[in-house]
């Protein structure tokens, strides 16, 4: 269990330091500097890469998941995407000032590796924990992710703030070195999963070509088969909405704070708060999931997020921003962890890779609705605060669908219907 969860510790360095932290500011201030473009266009270019890589992984995930199930190749697939992710992250240190095309290329490679590896990491949950422990183990993974990502991010923030202490020429050099530290951290702590975690292997492994053809055929039937597992199917519909809202908040929180007028240093400190508070909060949510059921735990998180987005739309002071960061930290990891474990508990174990392919496909397509909603509403009202308030609708819809699910997962191992 710990060896599996350490991958969350490993890859959260990319999610925190690169995705949520430095890439947003470094792209416009260093790689895109000197070009006469607006900040909006600079942000749009980066977001386009995020959307493109998300869609690419979303389209590949169900097919690769089905292949992995047939060949017992979840760890192999995870390793392949890990190589892409680590290499792309390390290469982010290479592009010089103004070399934004090269930077976007390496960022895209890293993002594909990060998202693709998560498909197979999530599906390994059924190999490392019994059904009754899904909630705790999933939450423990997210908790370690917050702690690991937060520790490296703290070190990198100090490095950028005081580059002379590390023998670096300035903040730009420190950020580029930070990308290398993320790659080393990600690769190094992933070793435990590959060495210790045991994956269920099929009796016989078909040739790769056969697995690919069978996988493609199976994907055409997976959606129809998902409908036979009503709880998992309805849950995915709800997940589309509420996780879109969660991902929108994650991807826009720092930019929203910047638009409101807060200093970059304050925004980075708030992000650090989220990481370190998120560690115990995710564990507490795992305990809540075991006591009252994961669906009810998710509903608590959904209701909290709806309130957070509404309160954020009226935010005026940096103190209020810090308070909202703490609130997000209390629910962000928990809602993600319980979603993963709740889905795992309602699908057949022998098809976990395939079903988690669809789960991750849904997850990668999300934040498109929320980002679009924020943009359209914000432009229509000429107020970014109103745009943030509109995201609460996603949580209302997702929560309403979750309420239609009456049956909690049974404690026994899931079986495919006959």
Image (spheres, grey):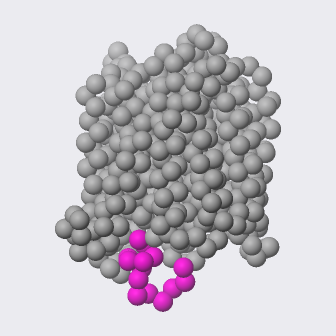
Q: How many marks?
A: 0
Residue at 23% across, 74% down: 169
Image side of residue 166 versus residue 257, left or right = left
Q: Residue furthest front?
A: 319
Q: Is residue 400 visible in this depiction of the protein?
A: yes
Q: Is residue 376 visible in this depiction of the protein?
A: no
Question: Residue 7 in the image: x percent, y percent?
Answer: 37, 37
Residue at 51% across, 76% down: 42
Q: Which of the pair 380/366 is nearer the observer?
A: 380
Image side of residue 57 versus residue 386, left or right = left
Question: Residue 236 in the image: x percent, y percent?
Answer: 66, 36
Above or below for 81 versus 270: above
Residue at 76% across, 55% down: 310
Q: Residue furthest top?
A: 412
Q: Quadrant of residue 378?
A: bottom right
Q: Quadrant of the C terminus?
A: top right
Q: Quadrant of residue 145?
A: top left
Image side of residue 30 versus residue 236, left or right = left
Question: Residue 315 in the image: x percent, y percent?
Answer: 71, 63
Q: Quadrant of the N terminus?
A: top left
Question: Residue 381 in the image: x percent, y percent?
Answer: 80, 73
Q: Quadrant of residue 5?
A: top left
Q: Indicate yes or no whether the magenta region holds residue 28.
A: yes
Q: Residue furthest left?
A: 167
Above or below for 212 versus 164: above
Read off the magenta span.
Answer: 26-39
Residue at 33% across, 21% down: 198
Q: Indicate yes or no whether the magenta region holds residue 41.
A: no
């Amino acid at each position: 269990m710990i060896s599996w969860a350490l991958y969350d510790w490993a890859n959260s360095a990319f999610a925190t330091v690169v995705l949520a932290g430095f890439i947003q500011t470094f792209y416009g201030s260093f790689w895109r500097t000197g070009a006469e473009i607006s900040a909006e266009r600079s942000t749009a270019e980066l977001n386009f890469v995020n959307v493109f890589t998300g869609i690419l992984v979303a389209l590949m995930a169900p097919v690769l998941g089905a292949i992995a199930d047939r060949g017992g190749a979840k760890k192999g697939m995870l390793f392949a995407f890990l190589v892409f992710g680590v290499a792309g992250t390390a290469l982010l240190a290479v592009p010089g000032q103004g070399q934004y095309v090269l930077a976007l290329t390496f960022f895209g490679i890293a993002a594909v590796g990060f998202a693709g590896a998560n498909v197979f990491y999530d599906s390994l949950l059924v190999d490392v924990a019994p059904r009754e422990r899904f909630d705790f183990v999933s939450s423990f993974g997210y908790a370690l992710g917050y702690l690991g990502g937060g520790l490296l991010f703290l070190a990198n923030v100090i490095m950028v703030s005081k580059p002379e202490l590390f023998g670096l020429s300035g903040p730009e050099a420190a950020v580029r070195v930070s990308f290398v530290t993320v790659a080393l951290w990600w690769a190094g702590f992933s070793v435990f999963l590959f060495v210790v975690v045991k994956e269920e292997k099929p009796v016989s492994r078909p040739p790769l070509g056969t697995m690919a053809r069978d996988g493609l055929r199976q994907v055409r039937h997976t959606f129809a088969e998902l409908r036979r597992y009503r709880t998992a199917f309805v849950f995915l519909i709800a997940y589309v909405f509420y996780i879109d809202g969660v991902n929108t908040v994650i991807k826009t929180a720092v930019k929203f704070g910047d638009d409101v007028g807060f200093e970059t240093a304050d925004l980075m400190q708030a992000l650090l708060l989220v990481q370190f508070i998120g560690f115990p909060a995710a564990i507490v949510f795992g305990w809540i999931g075991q006591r009252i059921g994961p669906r009810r735990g998710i509903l608590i998180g959904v209701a909290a997020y709806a309130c957070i987005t509404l309160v954020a739309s009226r935010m005026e002071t940096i103190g209020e921003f810090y308070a909202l960061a703490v609130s997000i930290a209390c629910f962000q990891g928990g809602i993600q962890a319980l979603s993963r474990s709740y889905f795992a508990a309602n699908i057949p174990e022998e098809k976990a890779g395939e079903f988690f392919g669809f789960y991750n496909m849904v997850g990668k397509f999300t934040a498109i609705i929320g980002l679009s909603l924020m943009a359209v509403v914000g432009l229509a009202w000429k107020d970014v605060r109103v745009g943030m308030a509109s995201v609460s609708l996603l949580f209302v819809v997702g929560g309403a669908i979750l309420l239609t699910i009456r049956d909690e997962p049974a404690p026994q191992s899931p079986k495919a219907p006959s």
